[in-house]
Structure formats: C-alpha cells, structure tokens
Amino acid sequence: ELKVEQNPLFLSMQEGKNYTIYCNYSTTSDRLYWYRQDPGKSLESLFVLLSNGAVKQEGRLMASLDTKARLSTLHITAAVHDLSATYFCAVGETSGSRLTFGEGTQLTVNP
Amino acid sequence: DAGVIQSPRHEVTEMGQEVTLRCKPISGHDYLFWYRQTMMRGLELLIYFNNNVPIDDSGMPEDRFSAKMPNASFSTLKIQPSEPRDSAVYFCASRPSDRKSFFGQGTRLTVV
C-alpha cells in the first residue's frame, strides 16, 4: 500500500523568508503532483512531476522530484501572504490512475 | 470551459435519507474521480472511471455508496442510507490521459 507523508503539517513563516515542504512516499511511482487548497475552496493544480530530477518553478514556488529517494520538495522563496494555503502532494501508483494524497501542509505567511 | 461542475454545493440531510451528488466533468476528459475530504482522514479516493467505466472502486466505504457514469458528461455518487459519519466535502475531478486533474468546487454534505 502506497503511503505518502508530508512534513511539516503546519508551517508558520514570516514574509520574505524561504522554506521547504517535504513529501515522502513509500513505493515506486512515476508521477507526483502538488496542489494548493484555500480554506473552503477546491484544489488547484500547481505542478506535475513525471521523471527523476524533474524541477518546475512558478513564481515563488519550485517543486522537485527524486524518485530514487522517493522524495519531492516544494520550496518557497521570499514568501508573501498570498501563499497562505494548504499544500498537498499526491503520488500516482504505477499501475492504474489512483492518486494517494499526503496529509497536507497548512502554510501561514505572516506579515 | 466552465471547469468541473458539481451540484449541489451544499447538502444537509437527515440520517437515513438518500443523497445524490452530481458531477459534470470537463469535456474531452477521459478520467473522472470522486474524492472525499474530512479533517480526520484527509483526501481519499472513492472511485474513478475511465471512459465511463468504473476502474477502481476500492475506496468506496461500504455498500451504502454507489457511483455511476452513464455517459461522458455526467456522473453521480449516491449514498443510501446516509449516516452522520458520511458528512464531508465530496470532490469530483476529471483529467485527460496522463495530465493533471481538475477539481470541482465540491459538495459539502452534512448528515444530521
């Protein structure tokens, strides 16, 4: 059974600081996704990572994937308040299209 | 495109009643997923369809839950009879092959 763990689960940071959210998973996978969810809202897709060493960046967020370590990171650069949300990673099983989600990281960026 | 459309947005029902949640996926998407989100269990995949055919329903909690996709533009998730522990936000998502999923706005279900 595929298990996905994120840490930290709660992150409070100041504007302008950098931080990294980690996503570990337990079995081989060929794709990993990052989503953002604002309170009471739906999930918004941020990144799709499909190969070892993949790195994608948009704005202040950068995601990377190391399939050998079964680890993905979401790096936040110079955080701003608008980035406050819950961030989920989701890992795809190699057979089929099932996604297993991590518990989510609730990020709060303080002025 | 209007995105994935779910209805209703909110549903409050009494225990024992039948509840039907509806989803209209994005046109052209081959895959449709039903998820449930709760504080205790996070996001769980209930079932997914490929080209209208149920592929994996191992996440469906029990026989009270059923899902159908009669055509490419419509799916339902039915709970009969509903119980208070079914209270959650239910999301529908769709995607084309090998691409990211697009989520609907969700249906917040409260069973009292």
Image: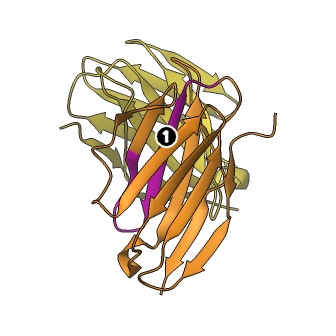
Chain colours: A yellow, B orange
- Looking at the rendered structure, the kind of residue marked 1 is Phe
Is B62 situated above or below A26? below
Instruction: Sort mark 1 into few (<14), some (14-19) or many (20+) by Cα contacts within 10 Å.
Output: many
Foreground pick, B81 / B39: B81
Residue B50: x and y in percent read 47, 27
Is B11 situated above or below A27? below
Q: Residue at x 23, y 22 (%)?
A: A28
Residue B26: x and y in percent read 69, 33
* Chain name for mark 1: B
Q: Give the residues in magenta.
A: B29-46
Secondary structure mostly seen in magenta is strand
Residue A23: x and y in percent read 36, 38
Query: Can residue B30 be found in the magenta stretch?
Result: yes
Foreground pick, A52 / B96: B96
Residue A31: x and y in percent read 40, 22
Q: Which residue is mark 1?
A: B33
Left or right of B110 in this view: A67: left
Count up the numbered dots. Answer: 1
Label 1's element?
strand
Q: Quadrant of the C terminus of chain A?
A: bottom right
Left or right of A88 in this view: B85: left
Q: Residue at x 30, y 45 (%)?
A: A5
Foreground pick, B75 / A58: B75
Residue B105: image quadrant is bottom right
